[in-house]
Amino acid sequence: MAPDDKGALFPAEGGVRERVIAFLQKAISQGCFDAVLIPARAPGTDSLTYSLIGAEQLLENAYPLPPVMPVQGAKAISSLTRTGKGTKKIAALIRPCELRATVELFKLGQVDLDNIWLISIDCPGALPLAEWAKDAKKAEDAFAKILKEGPNEDIRPICQICDKFSTTGAEDLHIGVPAGKASGILLIPNSPKGEAILECLGITAGEDLSGWRERVDKLTGARVEKKRQAQQELEAKSKGLDKLLDTFSQCINCHNCMRVCPICYCQQCFFDSDNMQFSFEDYLKRAQAAGGLRLPPDTLLFHIGRMLHMSLSCVSCGACEDACPTAIPVAQVFSLVGNRNQEAFDYVPGRSRDEPPPLRVYQEEEFEEVEQSHAAVPAKQEARDG
Amino acid sequence: MGEGFTPRIVGFLCNWCSYAGADLAGAAKLEIPASLSVIRVMCSGRVDPVLVATALLRGADGVLIAGCHPGDCHYREGNYYARRRFALLKKTLETLGLDTKRLMLAWVSASEGQRFGEVANQFAGQIIGAGIAGIEASLLLANSGRKVYLIEKTSYIGGNVIKFEEVFPNMDCATCMIAPKQQELLANENIELLTLSQVEAVSGAAGDFSVKIKQKARYIDLVNCIGCNACFDPCPVEVDNEFEEGLTKRKAVYIPCAGALPNVPAIDTENCLRFKGKECQACQEACAFEAIDFDQQDKELELKVGAIVVATGFSMFDIGKISQYGYKKLGGVYSAMEIERICASNGPTQGEITLQSGEAPKSVAIINCVGREEKGYCSAVCCMAALKLCHFLKNKLPELKITQFYSDLCIPGKAYQHFYQEVKDSGVDFIRAEVTGISESGKELAVKYKTGEGKENSLAADMVILNPALEPGAESAKLAGMLNIPQSREGFFSEKEPDLTPVATAQDGIFIAGCAQGPKDIAETIAEAEATAGRILSRSG
Amino acid sequence: MAKRLGVYVCECGTNIADKVDIDKVLAVVRSLKDVVVADRYKLLCSGDGQEYLKQSITENGLTHLVVAACSPKQHETTFMNVCERAGLNPYLFQLVNIREQCAWVTSDGEAATDKAIRQIRAAISRVHYHTALEKKGMECNPDVLVIGGGIAGIKASQILAAPDRKVYLVEKTASLGGKTRRFSKLFVNMESGPALIAGEIERLQKNKNIEVLTESEAEQILGFLGNFEVKVVSKAEDKEAKEQNFNVGAVVLATGFDLSDAKGLPQYGYGTLDDVYTSLDFEEMNLADGPTQGKILLKNGQPPKSAAIIHCVGRAEKGYCSKVCCLYSFKFDRMLQSQLAGVKIAHFYSDLCIPGKANQKFYEDSRESGVEFIRSAVTEIAGGDKGLTVKYESESGAKGDLAVDMVILLPAMETSGDARKFAEMLNIPQDDKGFLAEEHQLLSPVASAVEGVFVIGCARGPQSIAESIVQAEASAGKILSALVPGRKLELEVKTSQILESFCTGCKTCLEVCPYGAITFDEDRQISVVNEVLCHGCGNCAAACPSGAARLKHFTFPQLYQELKEVLR
């Protein structure tokens, strides 16, 4: 976050949603983009889905910052360009974790961002999906309170420890939500495409962002500490083979977590493929050797394998935990492993469109601590350090 | 896990380095835990973390992944990725609280049988636990469809290169680097390897040479012998091992070093009792394969060939000629080649750097340009070789103080200066001076030198390494006469037109490559070998 | 079709039989599914042993073979050949190492037997999953494209060209000969550069198998070893651009060198002071068709009475030694002395680089003729009304200066500007100094990381004419050995494949392939392995999360089968 970055104040009235919709309507009318990809609520229903909206008036149904995250925005965006990029300009209004996942998918060749403007927005968190399914009205009221007063204990556990709820730097435009009663939203461009939106709207980035910055930084600091504590507690509960098996003991192998995960982009998951289909004799032998065998087997292997495949790109969005029918804290475990692995590789998924995924590159000298090599640490290093 | 617990350990070994290293451990009859089962893959980069996780979850008590040393990967980069994937796996398991002591990533080269043994035993314990120019030219010619006769004086291939543990500037493991080429050579049907052979006479002209070869009998049947080395122990004769620069002994029936190819011994008739008229068949009795055949005879062969490539390599200047350096007189004074063997993991000390007292040296002086004045030319590779030794020694003994004495630093080309800078930055001292003498000074040695300004000084050191000039191979003069090609004033084979036809000689159809032509490094040697193939295969005028 | 496995355990004389209880092994093996015959034999690699195996394959109608014996590195090829002779696909075979990695390293016989059983079971399970693989050959084009018409390119062309192998020699400028053509003398024997080049050009013109394209540039080179598609554009002055398309099997880059810009080092006064020349300037001066008709003259038209030759100009900045400057500086001594009787010459240098059998004498001759050698660092060349002054500092710190009429700078050699263009076009890595990188610095000095593309001469690093010629011939050696007219290129059998239906086009495999053997098909949006370039390392298979990339003979199910057996 550069201290001298600038933003523009887009004047608009009402709650956060109203202000955002006003901005989008103006942008469409000015021709800044042709359509918007945004969560929308079908009138008179509890149906919340990502919708591609081209008509200005239909934007009234748009529901930015929905109380829950029904579909991970990155999945929605990538499905748009599945067969190639379009010629129309689309703006996608998404949460920061959805943005980061989109950037990862971009690097993994799963989405073409040429004609897509990525717009993220300060996120107060989301409620567990199950709550919306149980009682949408109650959930909506609870979330309205959050939108007005800020995040509280109602948001999902993964959101409570999220320290990346604001601008990442890889989006085209970020919407900063000013505190309390404000007369608009802050539009913060982070790329030439983002700047083009401001130009199109005829507004200049001359707003002082320091107040907003301060609030964001303060909450980020608090979250970092909360994450550290929460992860410590989680480790105590789940670390070690027995505790791990316990944590996943209720897993029914539905693989929902994998299906909703934006990073799991494989046509067919390795763990659903023929590679993981073993013979009758094989199962029988295993059952005989161990005394018994769960069927379908290899539950822990699926989870650990999925971690090995996607943890470096895990953005801690929590879609997996929302989708788990047996309430396993899968997002928290995966986020923990993801964070540790990312630290080891000095990689933050989604922070840059140019940073290569760590397993695609290497340095000639690195990770000396994991290899058994007969050369001692070269003397020259000591000479330089000492 | 109860009593009688036998751990199940899986090792994924890469075909080119670590699997060969494991085989070498076998040839050396080291003890490897029976609990280690091996799965061969082509490259450590093939091992995906899910496979390892599967192994662990299927009950493996330990999974070992072994590959070539970074920088030596047969497929260039596979092991770099393997290392990253391993780091990911390890970190994941660590975070989940699963036992990461069950995982090991080790680099084992093809010549590191001993090391494989150490790695395997350490890991299991953790759980409860034929030279290079000739070879290159032969391969290129054979692969194009030509029949090649490769005449080698000694009993093994690889020449001088296999004596080096690591080579400059990238510190590649020399034996790992050429092992695939050696194996390709031995397996190539178009190449007939004639070891223990020398040229006796040459007649004819390009396109139609007649070459008389005398092949000494090896007394071992190449087909029956499986390289088990059982014949060595019983042999009563012990002599200095020339390959090891006399630092260790060998028997009269011997292979020069572990890993030498072909892996078949020879009998040294000059020292074997039987060939000196005494009764002895100890080796034959020990052989279970009827591979020892005292009735073999030296052979005379006549080969008809279209072209001849001379790649007889180099030998070293006799340092003894400079008596003031105390070589072979003072303890602690070594030649560079002796030190190369001491550094080698398959050498007389398995790579441990020690003085005769058994202790590691604390200070070393390296004297360059030994014999330069006498020979009248710069040997091109010694400065780099000395830097390589510095790098290697510093890695083995980080506290070692090294001083290099030199006259002009010869580090030409894009890659070498950087290496020099690295070595300099690691704390090695460089003194431009003429070394006038080496003498004993208490328990240490005193190196007396004179700088350019004429100042005289002395430096104390535990160990002195003398870096001598390169000379042409011992039989060069005789061979030059037989082939009717002139030698330069320095004794190397002469090119036809020095600046313009470096590998051609005055005789059409006879080519020279490598150090036979003049002192040079491995890269230039290979280029010249390839150039001779180019000239031979070319059908231009 | 039902599988019929044959399993044979070699006694290897006593080497295996003494340690491993082979009968116990056979008892276990015979009980396994699909094993129709299992037996022991004294020495399977012997002539008799191989014949025995061959007959057994035929008599028992075996569909798969497992042999437990020594290391595959010893006899895998031997037994694969036996399979072929018996009409069994050699990839439906597995060799188990129960000697080097079992009998020889396990002192306890029981433990060795257990291990042997484990590894043999692993092989038997694995071989069930083997598929027959066929040797592949590819038609290749034996012609060659040589880029750069200097001495290296010329020599490469001559040695490669033949009636069944055409060579296209493409040169950017109007004349062949590169820098060599503008060296009036060549070290060590002082031959004439222009005469040498003139002779070579004559030979080239007579050679019907070489097509020389001057004032031409290769604009596009696509493809791989054996099959490159080349587009060359020729543009002579005042003429229309002409395009030519042709196919070749290999490409040789010989783009040469440039001197680094001495103007970037103002302390030497190049471009600001009169009579400070670079080595190339001095070479031009000595040519009969040069600016002074071959006479060594100062700007004022007078011959110099003294000259200073400054070595290592730009060496510290570039970080490498340019290898040939010391040698050609001695050549300059002779050129100066032969024209200007009594000329005083002083060299300012740090380390003399004169490797090789003949070069020290060349230096000694210079010194003995009265040339002065001052080991020092030159801090400045100063101008004045009395001429030039070389200011220098010796290693001990003592300062000095020398007045001279002429200064000749020896700047560092860089790879020519065109190298970058081809590096990008052909995906050849450049090192941090800008030179094109070889495949392996020691073992493969003229091949590049891209198969079929060779880099010779100063494009890959500063070197002499002799070395450039060696490399030209070396590239010919490699090309002539690999691309034989009429013979198909033998390709790696155990290559990788990417299953279209599984591939999502994430390009992870493409990024990690060490050989650039994977390309992206924009139409189908999937990655595709070029089996000509694939070396079978399996990196792509390990990197692909969905298992779309699979390495033949080392697939996940095959490795899993081994795994599951050794862990029982």
Image: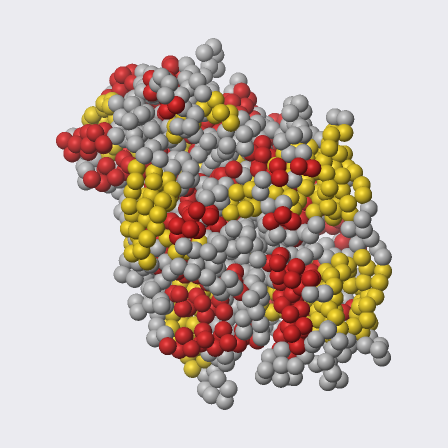
Question: Residue at position x 60%, y 29% from top?
Answer: B352
Query: Quadrant of residue A238 in the image?
Result: top right
Residue sitting at the far top:
B3
Q: Which residue lies furthest to the bottom in this view?
A: C238
| Above or below, comparing residue A323 to residue B54 in the picture | below
Q: Going by the image, does B48 lie left or right of C164?
A: right
Task: Residue at 24%, 23% (x, y): give it.
Answer: C41
Instruction: Tell me, yes or no, if residue A71 can be seen here.
Output: no
Residue B515 percent location from the top left of the image? 50, 49
User: Which of the pair B155/B56 is nearer the observer?
Assistant: B155
At 33% from the left edge and 29% from the top edge, which residue is drawn? B219
The residue closer to the viewer here, B347 or B499, is B499
Q: Is residue C472 visible?
A: yes
Closest to the observer, C96 or B51: C96
Where is B373 relative to B403, above or below? Answer: below
Residue C148 is left or right of residue B197, and the answer is right
Q: What is the x, y in percent for residue A1?
A: 72, 54
Q: Residue B169: give x, y in percent of width and height.
A: 59, 47
Nearest to the observer: residue A50 or residue B151: B151
Taking C402 as reference, is A133 left or right?
left
Q: Residue at x 65, y 46 (%)?
A: B369
- Residue reaching furthest left? C59
